[in-house]
Amino acid sequence: MLPSGKALVAGVMGWPVGHSRSPRLHGFWLREYGIDGAYVPLAVPPDRIEQAVRALPALGLRGANVTIPHKEAVVAALDRVEPAARRIGAVNTIVVLPDGTLEGRNTDGFGFIENLRAGAPGWRAVAGPAVVLGAGGAARAILVALADAGAPEIRLLNRTADRADRLADELGGPVRVLPWEARPAALDGAALVVNTTSQGMAGHPPLDIGLGALPPDAVVTDIVYTPLETPLLAAARARGNPVVDGLGMLLHQARPGFEAWFGRRPEVTPALRAFVLETT
């Protein structure tokens, strides 16, 4: 249905923002549920992000997603930031509350855990150590989510050791840093392997890691979804490990924001996956 003058409106802020699949994703749900609403791309240069965020209530928007390069910068423009987002140090979802207050949330960890639960129903965080490759922004959210879910040990490996050390010091808990060269041995006894690096993405070299020490029942996931099956996932699948692709993380992380803005808890369905994949 076409939005009316009473439409509920949200969007996504980024610079650039044309690559974002969020308008397609939220647009699917709006049509699916017959909601009078709209979700629009909002190209905001870095030097205008605080001004743009503070304008959301005046413009009548219900909120916005936040993507590169604004996830950290928007924190200063918000009235309140949820504890998980504060720990992660980044916001990907802004909600305009009824009184006009701006609340920042981070749903990346939620999306990651929900994707694992959907793709590998038998996986439990408490089952054993998790191995996380990479120490960027996505890794921060995933580390917090795994720790909160009860992972007894998280082995963090990054090509730049100092970055991994700083991240482990900030987050504490079960996070333990291992050298990048130790990645094959780090898989010994692991219950989960997560690649958060760009290695394996279309146009990038594959992740160089031997899976010989990985237990046969360990779950392997990659946050990359172009291609949908990365070389890492293909190698894990070939040896019989359960694998979970990265598209579901994108889809599930969008659910809490959609519910907050449009009043309906959406579902991730095969039809939604197929629709989003049409652009990949």
Image: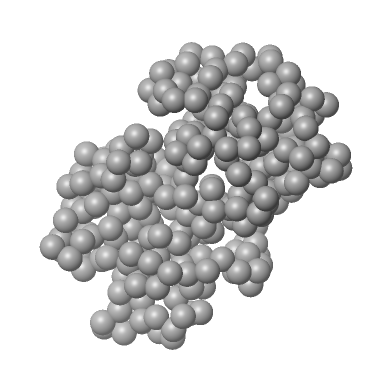
Q: Is residue 136 left or right of residue 92?
A: right
Which residue is at 65% across, 69% downward?
270
Q: Quadrant of residue 5?
A: bottom left
Residue lying at the far right of the rendered structure: 238
Which residue is at 51% across, 73% downward?
28
Q: Position of residue 210 (x, y in %)?
A: 79, 25
Q: Quadrant of residue 99?
A: bottom left
Q: Position of residue 192 (x, y in %)?
A: 66, 36
Q: Position of residue 167 (x, y in %)?
A: 44, 23
Quadrant placement of the N terminus: bottom left
Q: Nearer the viewer, residue 217 or 272?
A: 217
Q: Is residue 224 left or right of residue 233?
A: left
Work out whether residue 56 can be spotted: yes
Which residue is at 79% across, 25% downward?
213
263 in relation to 147, above or below: below
35 in relation to 102, above or below: below
278 in relation to 8, above or below: above
Work out whether residue 203 can be spotted: no
Display coloring: one colour
Which residue is at 77% across, 30% downward?
214
Quadrant placement of the C terminus: bottom right
Residue lying at the far left of the rendered structure: 99
- Looking at the image, how many numbered discs can be counted on the residues? 0
Q: Nearer the viewer, residue 35 or 86?
A: 86
Q: Nearer the viewer, residue 126 or 30?
A: 126
Q: Is residue 6 left or right of residue 208?
A: left
Q: Position of residue 259 (x, y in %)?
A: 38, 67
